[in-house]
């Protein structure tokens, strides 16, 4: 049986394509060395449009009355906070622009403002060498090193020295553990359940957090913080699998990169990359589920535990809840053999 692989590799050779969503300009050359945070391409994004209903905002009945109160003409530039329209009187009503931009339309009492165009900058995401230029769209980067893939990220990219927090990896990370010694580092820790921990990490500041897991109610805050967050196991209070933790602690104090961008639809996972001087072999994106493979359980009560595949069960197996599924027998690290649905297993390679 062939299934996707989650990579936890001490040494491999990788190629990563970095592409702009629209045509732009590539800023690097073939064979150029880049850092994870270097800008390799850029493009101008068309401005978005803001529609303001002046008639409704000023509580007017007629469209013409609303347009008489508008103080700008089509084509004029506006800045955030500018008064676009207002009524007179003891308690005047005011419509202000919430963005910088240009008035592109005034029609039936509505103003349409086009936001100023934004520059989109594409970073390398990993340290390495530019192996290929994709004209007007991006680059392909090659590098060698250790590769670890997580299951969730907050879509940010950074690099820094890897440090492991001074507490057991299966414990909750607290604010007291985030001291000044972690400033500017990518920090490996257990799970997080409290928002003040993510806020304290930003105050240190850290360059990134590699966590075993996190409470799902922290997702919104995780997207707002300035540093990348990668979850190795997912949401809840799940300890980090032994293979990943061992690989991280053996590379402590090395310079690493974090790419917390991910796309589950396309099978792209958040990645931690540790550049190394030796050359590795390319990793396979799919693996065969055969006896002896190292796997990880993705659901309770064995979430995050790495195990060895003992055998695939023939046919369908009936679970205690009555469902019939394809299943496998696995041996956990404590030598206990259990039966798990194949859909709840990851291959770790």
Image: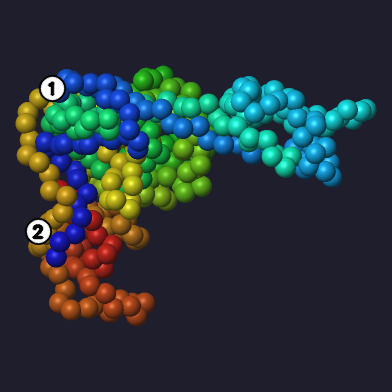
Q: Which residue is mark 1?
A: 31
Name the residue: 30% across, 57% down. Answer: 298
**Where is residue 61 shown, x and y percent of the image?**
84, 45
* C-alpha separation, residue under disc 1 versus residue under disc 2: 40 Å
* In the foreground, 80 or 172: 80
Is residue 249 shown to the viewer in this render? no
* In the foreground, 175 or 260: 260
Check the image and report above or below for 331 versus 312.
above
Which mark's residue is nearer the viewer, 1 or 2? 1
**Where is residue 99 shown, x and y percent of the image?**
61, 28
Name the residue: 19% across, 59% down. Answer: 3
Name the residue: 22% across, 36% down. Answer: 17
Check the image and report above or below for 259 versus 313.
above
* In the foreground, 299 or 57: 57
Is residue 84 shown to the viewer in this render? yes
- Judging from the image, what secondary structure is the residue with disc 2 in? loop
Q: Is residue 154 left or right of residue 77?
A: left
| Corner quadrant of residue 66 | top right
Name the residue: 24% across, 77% down. Answer: 317
**Where is residue 321 shown, x and y percent of the image?**
36, 77
Q: Is residue 290 left or right of residue 45?
A: left
| Corner quadrant of residue 232 | top left
Mark 1 / mark 2, whichever is N-terminal:
1
Q: Which residue is mark 2?
A: 292
């Amino acid at each position: 049986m062939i299934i996707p692989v989650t990579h936890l590799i001490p040494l491999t050779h990788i190629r990563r394509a970095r592409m702009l969503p629209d045509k732009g300009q590539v800023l690097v050359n073939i064979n150029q060395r880049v850092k994870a945070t270097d800008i390799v391409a850029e493009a101008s994004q068309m401005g978005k449009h803001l529609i303001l209903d002046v008639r409704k905002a000023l509580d007017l009945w007629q469209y013409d009355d609303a347009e008489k109160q508008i103080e700008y003409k089509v084509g004029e530039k506006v800045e955030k906070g500018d008064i676009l329209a207002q009524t007179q009187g003891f308690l005047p009503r005011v419509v202000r622009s919430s963005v910088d931009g240009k008035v592109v339309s005034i029609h039936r009492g509505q103003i349409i403002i086009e936001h100023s165009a934004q520059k989109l900058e594409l970073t390398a995401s990993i340290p390495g060498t530019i192996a290929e230029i994709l004209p007007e769209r991006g680059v392909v980067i090659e590098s060698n090193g250790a590769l670890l893939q997580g299951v969730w990220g907050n879509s940010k990219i950074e690099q820094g020295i890897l440090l492991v927090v001074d507490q057991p990896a299966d414990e909750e990370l607290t604010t007291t553990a985030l001291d000044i010694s972690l400033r500017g580092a990518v920090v490996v820790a257990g799970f997080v359940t409290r928002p003040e921990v993510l806020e304290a990490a930003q105050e240190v500041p850290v360059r990134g957090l590699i966590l075993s897991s996190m409470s799902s109610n922290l997702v919104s805050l995780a997207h707002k913080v300035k540093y990348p967050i990668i979850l190795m196991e997912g949401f809840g209070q799940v300890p980090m699998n032994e293979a990943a933790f061992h690989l991280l602690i053996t590379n402590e104090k090395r310079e690493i990169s974090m790419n917390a961008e991910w796309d589950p639809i396309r099978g792209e996972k958040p990645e931690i990359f540790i550049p190394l001087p030796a050359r590795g072999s390319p990793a396979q994106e799919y693996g065969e589920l055969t006896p002896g493979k190292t796997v990880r359980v993705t659901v309770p009560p064995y979430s995050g535990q790495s195990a060895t595949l003992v055998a695939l069960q023939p046919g369908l197996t009936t679970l205690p809840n009555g469902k019939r599924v394809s299943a496998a027998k696995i041996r956990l690290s404590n030598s206990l053999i259990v039966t798990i649905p194949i859909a709840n297993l990851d291959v770790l390679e």
